[in-house]
């Protein structure tokens, strides 16, 4: 019996061949695979622009930069996310404001977010937690009223549908990650999609040192055809063609990956929703189940985790609320009790294994283990 982790990649021969083909070619980076991957993403999401990055964190950093986040500006988000959602604001000298989650969706609560809007709010960053497509309408309204930009951290939600439309269309900018536990992988990689020419241009500049080679975009008259110009302080956040080739090949399988994640979640739902003391995740027709965040009885999470591990099931916990990380507590004065819904959810949460290669038999094995622990 294999040890089951909460997530893992699925790589097939076609993926391997795609990467090998790039290795045998002329371009390892800044070549045609990167543009082809971006084009495939534009086609899938229906967004005008897709801009690739070295990883999802760099993509968030680029999206916040595009939105103009700087010193004195706030990014308003949920504490129930990966630290990177907040860190992107800090990299730019901005600050992070939090509002609690709605326990019915596990996503940022729009009413609570409204109370946290200030004159400094530059970005509102809802996270479609676990793959549940967050309702963006109230955030768009809120952003309009205060002149903020809506950036969805869609790292959990590639393949999810909101009212029949893929996540990636809806916010001003949407960020994805291609870490191996996510829906598709490039090893490391990220993408931002947007309909805005201006945001896309700023991100393309930002990911390559802030340097442009385009004579038409230059501030000064070019000295010659060799001229380049650094216009903003950027980074080297480029995705390589090796990664992009894997991404193109993986994106073709997104529908298949997502369908299997939904099947697994439906099976868990049917096996666990009646078990005393457990709370299964919120469901939504468009959910893409990056995670299956089960809540176990308060006070018993450590016991569940230990007993699952004894049965070869390596659950994970998502997440320690960001405001409770020592760095955030120490530097910004956050403390336990600041966001009670997120903290209560965290204290009960275990992410059960959910990934393409997980068999029905393995799902049953996990559910039986959980039921056994619940009943004793
Ligand atoms: C994975 C993830 C990120 C960061 O992506 P990386 O590719 O690992 O840098 C950001 N936000 C959320 C919510 C994530 O799950």
Image (tube, rainbow, N blue to C red):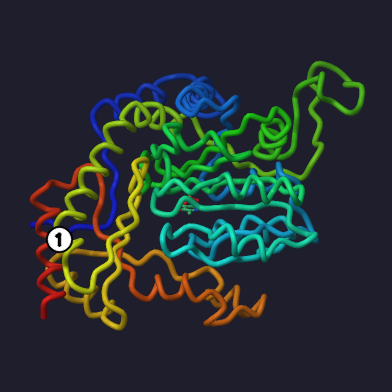
Where residue 238 sits, quadrant-wise, is top right
The response on whether ligand 1 sits within 8 Å of label 1 is: no
Classify residue 111 as left or right of residue 66.
Answer: left
**Residue 2 location (% of width, % of height):** 12, 56
Among the 4 quarters of the image, the one containing residue 370:
bottom left
Residue drawn 72% across the image and 59% down it: 74
SS class, disc 1 = helix
Camera-side residue of 151 and 39: 151
Q: Nearer the viewer, residue 58 or 334?
A: 334
Closer-to-camera residue (42/21): 42
Q: In the rendered view, does 88 fall on the left or right side of 243?
A: right
Q: Could you tell me which residue is drawn at 14 percent across and 72 percent down?
A: 310
User: If the image is split into quadrants, where does the N terminus sit?
Assistant: bottom left
Place of residue 126 in the rendered image (x, y in percent of width and height, measured from the top left): 55, 53
Identified at 56% across, 56% down, the residue is: 85
Residue matched to label 1: 366
Callout 1: few (<14), some (14-19), or many (20+) C-alpha neighbours within 10 Å? many
Q: Residue furthest top?
A: 225
Q: Is residue 362 left or right of residue 300?
A: left
Q: Position of residue 293 (x, y in %)?
A: 32, 60
Find residue 192 and report its horizontal and vertical position in percent: 57, 38
Asked if residue 295 is positioned above or below residue 200 in the image, the reply reads: below
Say above or below: 23 vs 150: above
The residue lying at 59 percent from left, 49 percent from top is 138
Between 267 and 112, the one lying in front of the other is 112
Picture quarter with the C terminus: bottom left
């Amino acid at each position: 019996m294999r040890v089951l982790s909460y997530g893992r990649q699925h790589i097939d021969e076609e993926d391997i061949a795609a990467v090998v083909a790039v290795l045998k070619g002329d371009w390892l980076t800044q070549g045609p695979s990167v543009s082809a991957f971006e084009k495939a993403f534009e086609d899938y999401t229906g967004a005008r622009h897709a801009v690739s990055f070295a990883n999802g964190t760099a993509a968030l950093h680029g999206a916040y930069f595009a939105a103009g986040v700087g010193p004195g500006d706030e990014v308003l988000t949920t504490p129930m996310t990966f630290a990177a959602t907040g860190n992107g604001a800090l990299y730019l000298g901005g600050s992070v404001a939090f509002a609690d989650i709605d326990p019915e969706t596990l996503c940022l609560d729009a009413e609570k977010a409204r109370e946290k809007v200030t004159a400094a709010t530059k970005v509102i960053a809802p996270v479609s937690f676990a793959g549940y497509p967050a309702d963006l309408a109230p955030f768009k309204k809120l952003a309009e009223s205060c002149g903020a930009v809506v950036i969805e951290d869609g790292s959990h939600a590639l393949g999810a549908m909101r009212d029949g439309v893929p996540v990636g269309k809806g916010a001003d900018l949407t960020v994805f990650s291609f870490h191996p536990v996510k829906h598709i992988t490039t090893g490391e990689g990220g993408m931002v999609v947007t309909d805005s020419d201006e945001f896309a241009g700023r991100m393309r500049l930002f990911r390559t040192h802030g340097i442009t080679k385009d004579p038409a975009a230059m501030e000064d008259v070019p000295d010659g055809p060799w001229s380049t110009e650094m216009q903003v302080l950027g980074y080297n956040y480029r995705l390589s063609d090796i990664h992009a080739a894997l991404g193109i090949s993986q994106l073709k399988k997104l529908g298949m990956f997502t369908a299997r994640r939904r099947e697994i979640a439906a099976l868990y739902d049917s096996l666990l929703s009646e078990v005393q003391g457990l709370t299964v995740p919120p469901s939504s027709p468009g959910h893409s189940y990056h995670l299956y965040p089960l809540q176990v009885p308060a006070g018993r999470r450590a016991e569940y985790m230990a007993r699952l591990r004894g049965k070869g099931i390596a659950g994970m916990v998502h997440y320690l609320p960001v405001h409770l990380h020592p760095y955030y507590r120490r530097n910004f004065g956050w403390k336990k009790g600041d966001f009670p819904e997120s903290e209560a959810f965290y204290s009960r949460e275990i992410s059960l294994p959910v990934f393409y290669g997980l068999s029905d038999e393995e799902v049953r094995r996990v559910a039986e283990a959980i039921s056994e622990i619940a009943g004793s």
